Image (cartoon, helix red, strand yellow):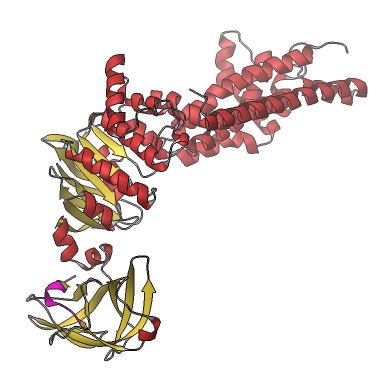
Amino acid sequence: MESWSPLFISVKTASLSTLITFFLGIIVAWRMGKSKYKAMLDTIFTLPMILPPTVLGFFLLLILGRRGIIGSILNKFDLNIIFSWSATVIASIVVSFPLMYKTARGAMEQIDINIINAARTMGVSELKIFYKIILPLAWPGILAGIGLSFARALGEFGATLMIAGNIPGKTQTIPIAIYFAAEGGDMDLAMKWVFVVFIISLSTMFIMNYLSSYKKKSTLHGGIQ
Amino acid sequence: MKIDIKKILNEFDLNIKFEVKDKPIALLGASGSGKSMILKCISGLEKPDMGYIEKDGLMFFNSSQNINMKPKDRKIAFIFQNYALFPHMTVYENIAFGLFNKKKDEREYIIKEKLEKVHLIGFEKKYPFELSGGQQQRVAIARALALEPEILLFDEPFSALDNYTKESVIEEIKEILENFNGKSIFVTHNMDEAYELCEDIVVINKGIKESEGDKNIIFQNPPTLETAKITACKNIEEVKQINEDTVYVKKWNVILNIRKSNDIKYIGIRAHNIVIDSDKKENIIICTLEYINEKPFEKTLYFNPIKSRSKELIKCTVEKNRIFQESDINKIYNLYFPKSKIFTMSN
């Protein structure tokens, strides 16, 4: 195998984007419970899940490109996101965010409202209710969200290709490496990367299943604090 | 404490006014009558559209003065039907959760004292799922008392408990309320609970106060049709008033003497107040026994007045040891309706 760089780029990208979607997702899911425009916001935040990744990539190009709203500002500081490593992260965040947000929101909605009401009457601040009650009780769902977002980020292809391109050693992630290897007729190389993706995805799933069953056990037998 | 609030809800509008004195008060109403919403408004978890909530001169809420105190500043404690304990915290942690601004030894003292009150010393390290329903509700009570509230709000606190456990929790709550110096409000659809725990009752129907007053008056002389229904009166009949003290009961096709009153549209009599086989001369309805419905400790007998032109039966409950058998069906009985037990309603 020529270089392991697609593996490092993929793992680095997926990890950073999952970290960011984790915080974004749970905060948006939490604040959403109080918003008046719940239905509208929910549609907007879920949109990246149903739109084709190339459409998302196209929008991102419009926004982040030299003449885009954000791109033009960054350009003044001599910063360019398009075709950089940050672009792979941004693409991954956009496509994986709905998964994190949706699962976290679902898990939070499952919590008995009276439990939260009880805490409210106890004089506890909303922030403390969030990290002492909502977060621990929604944790199994949030954990599933982390697994899903990581897997989605790892597999991201369309939007990444459009805004980050295929620069080996810089923006070439595993899915992109597979596509260009197969297109160039190097089936062995493609196969190797397919195998690597398989291993990573399977292990991610195993870890998540283990963690959530461990979590369940500890909730039942009273282990978590 | 005075409550006078309006709030637009999906099914109906809440529009209620009542006063809470020092004795516990019960809000009695069918499921979905808006009683729980009233508690939420009092606690500040929900905001009424109009009106005010005031306690000892302190405004919790006042729409015209733009006052809406936060739940935590109202010094209330809520006890829920499903206990609402924090499932991931131990009994100790559950109670300690609201005591975050107390010093450690003070906190420990309060927790111990409250657990003693509900007889749960030794359960500090247990998780809610390790406790029975009754124990969980007692933890919830201890947790509420630990806040040292001035108002205790109970939202159907016994609905999830079996009858046996319910009795013991009710006894405990009674004991606690005797030593409690604040206001307490019970929301329930169960008239026995309301009767057992409270002196005053407010009957609520579709967000509106149907009637209120001393529990004995509410139960013995329900002033309105809905009150009679919610207090489980089994015999309620539409009547045509003939004069001050007689009415014609349409469906039974009989005339009954009543206590003097005017403008009567309905009469009611509780199933246990009808006397079977009496030798009285007035207020007798001659009936045939239609069928018998047995419960563990009582029987309900269904009688059909012989003059009746409808299928509307008269329901009488008798103790189990009174012998009525299947073979008595279709026999004729004289039912006596004591004038003092018939109550009248104008709406």
Q: Nearer the viewer, residue B253 or B317?
A: B317
- For the question of whether residue B333 can be seen, the reply is yes
Residue B119 at x, y percent in the picture: 32, 34
Task: Report if residue B318 lies within the magenta region.
Answer: no
- For the question of whether residue B103 can be seen, the reply is no
Q: Nearer the viewer, residue A85 or B85?
A: B85
Quarter-of-image position of residue B342: bottom left
In the displayed structure image, the side of residue A160 where residue B329 appears, left or right: left
Name the residue: 79% across, 26% down: A198
Quick one: quadrant of the C terminus of chain B? bottom left
Residue A2 at x, y percent in the picture: 87, 11
Q: Is residue A4 above or below residue B304?
A: above
Name the residue: 62% across, 30% down: A213
Quick one: quadrant of the N terminus of chain B? top left
Span of residues in magenta = B336-342
Name the residue: 51% across, 31% down: A138
